[in-house]
Amino acid sequence: MQITIKGDPVADLRVAVDVGGTFTDICIFDESSQSMRVTKVPSTPDNPMQAVLNGVRRANINLGDVELFSHGTTVATNALITRKFPKAAMVTTTGFRDVIEIRDGTKDDLWDAYSDVSGPYIRRRDRFEVPERIDYAGNVVTTLDEDEARRVGRLLKKRGVDTVAICFINSYANAAHEVRIREILTEELPGANISTSAEILPEIFEHNRFNTTVANAVLGPLVSGYVEELDSNLTKDGYSGELLLLHSGGGSMTSEMVKRFPVRLAASGIAAGAIAAQHVAEQCGYANAVGLDMGGTSTDISLVAEGELRVTNDWEVEYGHPIVFPSIEVLTIGAGGGSLAHIDIAGSLRNGPQSAGADPGPACYRRGGAEPTNTDANLWMGRLGTDLADGEMTLDRACAKDAIEAKVASPLNLGVDAAADSIIKVANANMADAVRLVSIRRGLDPRDFALIAFGGAGALHGVDVAKELNIPTVVVPPNPGVTSALGCLLVDIQHDLSQMFTGAADSADSEAVEQHFKELELEGQERLRHEKVAESDGVFERGISMRYQGQWRSLQVKMGDGPNALREAVQLFHEEHEKQYAFRQDETPVEIYQLHLKALGKTPKPSFRPSPIGTGDPGEPLEVREVYFEGKWHSTPVYQRENLPSGAAFIGPAILNQIDSTTVIPPDSSAVIDEWFNIRIAVDSATSEPALAATAADSPQSVK
């Protein structure tokens, strides 16, 4: 596959758009010619849809030629952060009005007596109680008071409420009362968005269930309005397919299904980068990989182990407000190109999490920024050139030097070179520590992994971070700055369904378990039909959550079918428990906690084809530049990456420029452009796996 940046409109297109805080990235893949084009446009925070449309126009895309349009968005995440919600209300069982305020009693920082968890998404005065009660087994104890329900409905109408979350205790066991009050409120509040906890998250823990439902409700009108308007604009301009939106679980949803489950779009954009990292790792033959997505403000770190991305149900946009849908596990830290270097009150050098942002930006932008950033340090050290984005931005080394000298070098009595190097080393140490949290903390050895470095700044720092962790190989994708957008093209339509099923595994009725799975599959089939997925394209994957008797937390494992499926799942649970927690108790009874089903609707994906590998000669460099590495200035060749053929090989130091990123290959490292146009870097060329000593007959070796 040859990567191009500019060109004429092509046919048979698949388009992905990823909206970020600073830039909106557009990735256009043409199946017939196996070519890819990328475009970046400034994001429009006040109206994110405008940036999407601007990107489509700038890329010169004929939407009539587009087979698939996929979109990762920050609309839901930003709404939860800024709390710009429509008028919303919660209706709950008498006595449970304050569940979402009491929470679980924890704090993000246990030792900070002055730090409080932010308040619920719906204020107390907008939370209403209705008499009803169902017990843990699903039996009706107190019948729903329909007169009170109608009175509440009339009051909500008088208040002008647009969206309602219905959260009854124990509705996971019997949803009858939630279904009935939804009918009543629909009559009293025509056109209102109504979410019920039994539909959103049929789970026993009421705080998790209530808060997830409340988040779904407050996002409903916002996300629905955004999706409807974008869908309408795309259709008006010629697109005839379904608009697919990436959700946090690593799948996509059609616009119609998003209106029912808008909370699933929280963390949409972050998931795209993790999916792309998994794709690049698989393409290169690495079963284990760490994704390092370093942008302007933050770095997102994901982990692929044995070919699978880690998925969690324990996450939130704000601490104390859980969203209990499966989500790709991504650790985000405040380390980016714009992260500020500063001296703390103890006189130590720090890097981030504060950021210069896009405006004023780093000092070298000459827009008023006076604090040194990672970008300023990289520029002074020669790792960045003075021209960025194909000459659209010029960076000022003198401004970078002044900021580093005033804020870091002078206070620490260092030279400018050493100060800039120290800034980068602190940033790299922060990122390395974050990688340790997702790997070593779980008993995984980083030396068994490859590092996939992308984002606008990931390829600048990738090798240095890998050295900190003794990771042998770094892979830089063809277009690192827009790799997250590519992730949107690599997913299927996906729904994650669950159902409570508690009991001892050794005495469970396997027929009853099978019946519950069939009920989940019927619901999955209905959702896929609603999204116009052909029956032949539907795939169902079962899972089961179990725990040792007496435990509170459960662990999900894969579940097969057939008479021995449950017994095999118990054995797998023991094995997974040992991997996760370093011990197993085969003699302890195992309990079933919950059944899970992943309903997949297969969608067309790019079918990348490798390029023939040529000679190792990269040709003449664009220039030779002095670059600072480990206390010395080195004469370093600089190449334009778009001009390099597959097979081109390098011995560090070398710099590879491209429109959306810059790749640094330090001394003592070697690199090669592989058949997929990835850069594979052997961090220590003397001891590491060779960066694919490229021959057409060789296939990538898996890291194990």
Image (tube, rainbow, N blue to C red):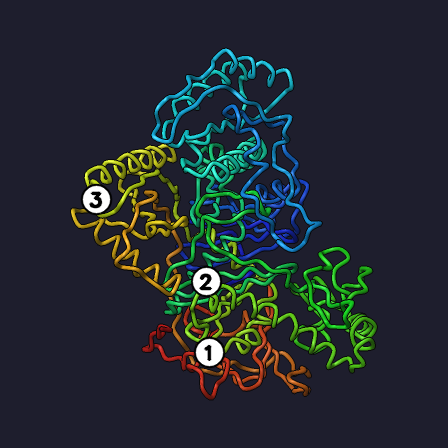
Query: Closer to us: mark 3 or mark 2?
Result: 3
Q: Mark 2 points at which residue?
A: 303
Q: Which mark is residue 472?
A: 1
Q: What element carries label 3?
A: helix
Q: How far apart are marks 3 and 1 (CA)?
A: 48 Å
Q: Where is residue 301 in the image (x, y as percent from the top left)?
A: 53, 61
Could you tell me which secondary element the residue under label 2 belongs to? Answer: strand
Q: What residue type is labelled 1?
A: Pro
- The residue closer to the viewer here, 414 or 45, is 414
Q: What residue is at 33 percent from the left and 74 percent from the top?
A: 699
Q: Which mark is residue 507?
A: 3
* Image side of residue 653 versus residue 183, left or right: right
Which residue is depicted at the point 30% across and 55% down? 573
Q: In this view, does 321 lie above or below 97?
A: below
Cα separation between marks 3 and 2: 36 Å
Instruction: Decide which of 424, 255 is in the foreground and name it.
Output: 424
Q: In which quarter of the image is the N terminus?
A: bottom left
Helix, strand or loop at label 1? It is loop
